[in-house]
C-alpha cells in the first residue's frame, strides 16, 4: 500500500510540481489554535504538514522552535495529546501529517504503542532527529507492518556517500536533507557545495528529497525547488505566527508560490 506522503510526491512529480512542507509546533499556544493553523496552511497550499511535538531538550531546534516548545509544554501538551489532536484534526482535513518528535517521548510511550496509536489516529509518518536509522530497526519494522506509516531520516552535509546510501535506504515517504550543520533557524547559504552534496543524495536514491533548516524567504525557497523535490520551512513560519499572526497567510502564500 502506498502511503499518502508517497502519493503526494508522485502526483507533484507527474505535473512538475514540488512539495511545500511547513512546520508548526503542536500546542503553540494551544491545540485549538493549532487546528486553525493547520487548516490555514492547507488553504495556502501546503502539501504536507510537519507537526512538532514539544520536548524539553530539543537538540536540533534553534531558539524560535525551542520557545514554541516551551509555550506548548506550559499548555500541558504531550505526545499522547498530540496524537489525540490528529485524530480530531482528521474530521476536518486529510492533508498528510508528519510528526517531528524526539526519541525520549516515543520511548516512554513505547515504540509499538506509538506506531499503533499514531497511525490509527491518522498520522502519516514520523521524523525523530535523535534516532539514527541504525538504532531504529524496531521502529522501522513496526512502521512497515502498518504499511502506510513512513519513517523519515535526516541526511546532513557531513554525511558520506556510504552513509547517505544507508540513510536513504532506511527512509520511506521522503528523505529529509538538512541544508547545513547547525540548528533550525540558522542562516542558509545556497551555494555550489550544497548543490554538490544534494547531487550525492540523488545519486544514492530515487526517493523524493526535501530540504529543510534555514529556509526563511521566498527567494531561498525558489532556489531550493530547483535542486529538490520539496522545501521544508519551520522556524520562519513559527516566528511569523507568534509575532505577526495577521501577516501569516500572506507570507505562507508567498512561500507556496515560490515553491
Image (cartoon, rainbow, N blue to C red):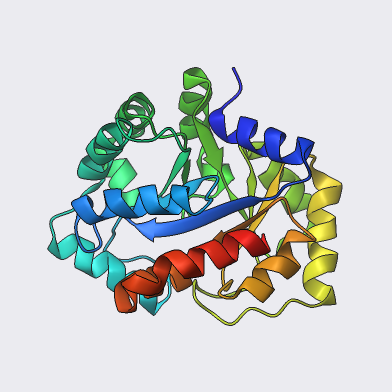
In the image, what residue occupies the spot 73% across and 51% down?
A: 164
Asked whether 122 or 95 is in front, the reply is 95
For residue 29, side relative to residue 140 (left or right): left
Location of residue 176 in the rendering, given as x and y in whole percent from the top left corner: 62, 53
Q: Residue at x 43, y 75 (%)?
A: 62
Q: Is residue 247 visible?
A: yes
Residue depicted at x 21% and y 49%: 78
Question: Which percent across, then down, holds residue 137?
Answer: 53, 34
On the question of residue 59 being in view, the answer is no
Q: Nearer the viewer, residue 38 or 111?
A: 38
The answer to whether 99 is drawn above or below residue 199 in the figure is above
Give coordinates of residue 55: x percent, y percent: 29, 59
Horizontal side of residue 189 vs 119, given as left or right: right
Front position in the image: 57 or 195: 195
Task: Kindly identify the residue that appears in the image at 79 percent across and 78 percent down.
Answer: 191
On screen, residue 251 above or below 204: below
Counting every numbered tag in the picture gives: 0
On screen, residue 115 versus residue 26, left or right, reads right
Question: Where's the N terminus, which quadrant?
Answer: top right
Examine the rendered structure and indicate whether residue 215 appears above or below residue 210: below
**Left or right: 157 with respect to 103?**
right
Quadrant, the C terminus: bottom right
x, y percentage for residue 217? 59, 75
Query: Which image quarter: residue 179?
Result: bottom right
The answer to which image quadrant residue 8 occupies is: top right
Question: Is residue 75 positioned above or below 35 on the image?
Answer: below
Amino acid at each position: 500500500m502506498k502511503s499518502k506522503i508517497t502519493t503526494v510526491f508522485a502526483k507533484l512529480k507527474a505535473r512538475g510540481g514540488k512539495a511545500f512542507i511547513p512546520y508548526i509546533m503542536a500546542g503553540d499556544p494551544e491545540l485549538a489554535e493549532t487546528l486553525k493553523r493547520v487548516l490555514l496552511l492547507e488553504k495556502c497550499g501546503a502539501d504536507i504538514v510537519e507537526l512538532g511535538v514539544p520536548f524539553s531538550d530539543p537538540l536540533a531546534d534553534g531558539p524560535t522552535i525551542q520557545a514554541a516548545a516551551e509555550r506548548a509544554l506550559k499548555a500541558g501538551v504531550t505526545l499522547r495529546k498530540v496524537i489525540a489532536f490528529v485524530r480530531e484534526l482528521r474530521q476536518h482535513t486529510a492533508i498528510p501529517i508528519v510528526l517531528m518528535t524526539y526519541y525520549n517521548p516515543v520511548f516512554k510511550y513505547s515504540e509499538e504503542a506509538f506506531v499503533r496509536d499514531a497511525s490509527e489516529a491518522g498520522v502519516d509518518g514520523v521524523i525523530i532527529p535523535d534516532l539514527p536509522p541504525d538504532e531504529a530497526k524496531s521502529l522501522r519494522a513496526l512502521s512497515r507492518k502498518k504499511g502506510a506509516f513512513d519513517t523519515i531520516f535526516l541526511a546532513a552535509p557531513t554525511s558520506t556517500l556510504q552513509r547517505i546510501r544507508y540513510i536513504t535506504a532506511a527512509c520511506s515517504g521522503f528523505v529529509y536533507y538538512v541544508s547545513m550543520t547547525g540548528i533550525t533557524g540558522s542562516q542558509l547559504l545556497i551555494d555550489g557545495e550544497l548543490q554538490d552534496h544534494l547531487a550525492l543524495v540523488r545519486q544514492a536514491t530515487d526517493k523524493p528529497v526535501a530540504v529543510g533548516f534555514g529556509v526563511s524567504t521566498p527567494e531561498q525557497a525558489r532556489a531550493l525547488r530547483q535542486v529538490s523535490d520539496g522545501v521544508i520551512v519551520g522556524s520562519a513560519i513559527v516566528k511569523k505566527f507568534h509575532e505577526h499572526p495577521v501577516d501569516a497567510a500572506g507570507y505562507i502564500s508567498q512561500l507556496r508560490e515560490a515553491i
